[in-house]
Amino acid sequence: MAGRPVAGESVIDTAGVRMERLGHARLPAFLAFADRTTLDSLLPLRATRRPAAGQTYLCALYRDQVIGCTSWYEGHRHDYVGLDGTTARSTGVYLCSSEVLPEFRGRGIGGMLYERRLAECGGGGGGAPAVSIEILGRGVPLSVDDEARPGLVWHLAHDFVVVGHSREDDAGPVLLLRRRRPASASARAEVQSVCDTNRAAVSARTSRPSLAHRPSLKSSTSMGPV
């Protein structure tokens, strides 16, 4: 059931929202979506008018309109700065940025994209590849841009843990998916501790403004509450 809209929002039935990988038949609708977004991860597609090699796109569709998107790379070598200050690397799935069109935000569509992406990219069972994501920062190690905060909270609540920060100028946190184990009180306490620690770090504001430049694959999520 659709939530109560605010001025300028569309009234939709979220039960009618479908998640679909981008195929040739959807390309015109996807290009129309891409031209409205700010996602740097779609820059190659906007320039060439065709999907980038090696990048998988997942679309949120409503009445044949693409209203949201996320994407990922497989076999990606992801270098970052570990929590001990040394260079670290994750090789596997790299999750790119996501966006939902403004008039469709605040309805849980972002969370639907995140969940389907994690299931489709192989982030589920044992033996699956490593899954990493960078969250857009504010120029200080482990800082988080305001727009990226909903994505950070979602991933921390879904078995991702902070393992370091980006080598890019924004220095946002890098998260890795921790393989699921049977739920236990100690595991839940550990996840909660990570969340609490990160929230404390985020709340420690600096006087530095948000960066105007956003790295091309950074998870600078624009979708409202997920």
Image (cartoon, rainbow, N blue to C red):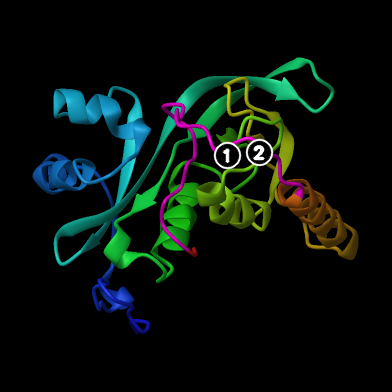
Examine the structure image and report whether residue 211 is included in the region drawn in magenta.
yes
Q: Which of the marked residues, 1 or 2, is nearer the chain's N terminus?
A: 1
Q: Which residues are magenta?
A: 204-224
Residue beneath disc 2: 175
Which element carries disc 2, helix, strand or loop?
Answer: strand
Residue contact between numbered discs 1 and 2, judged by CB atoms under 8 Å? yes
Q: Is residue 195 visible to the viewer in this orientation of the structure?
A: yes
Amino acid of disc 2: Leu
Pick the front one: 107 or 56: 107
Pick the front one: 144 or 163: 144
Which tag is nearer the camera, tag 1 or tag 2?
A: 1
Q: Is residue 51 visible to the viewer in this orientation of the structure?
A: no
Based on the displayed image, in which of its 4 quarters is residue 154 positioned? bottom right
Counting from the top left corner in percent of width and height, residue 83 is at 80, 28
Which element carries disc 1, helix, strand or loop?
Answer: loop
Counting from the top left corner in percent of width and height, residue 27 is at 13, 41
Residue beneath disc 1: 135
The answer to whether residue 102 is left or right of residue 174 is left
Q: Relative to 137, say whether 199 is above or below.
A: below
Counting from the top left corner in percent of width and height, residue 39 is at 34, 38
The answer to whether residue 67 is left or right of residue 118 is left
Examine the structure image and report whether residue 47 is included in the region drawn in magenta.
no
SS assignment for the magenta stretch, majority: loop
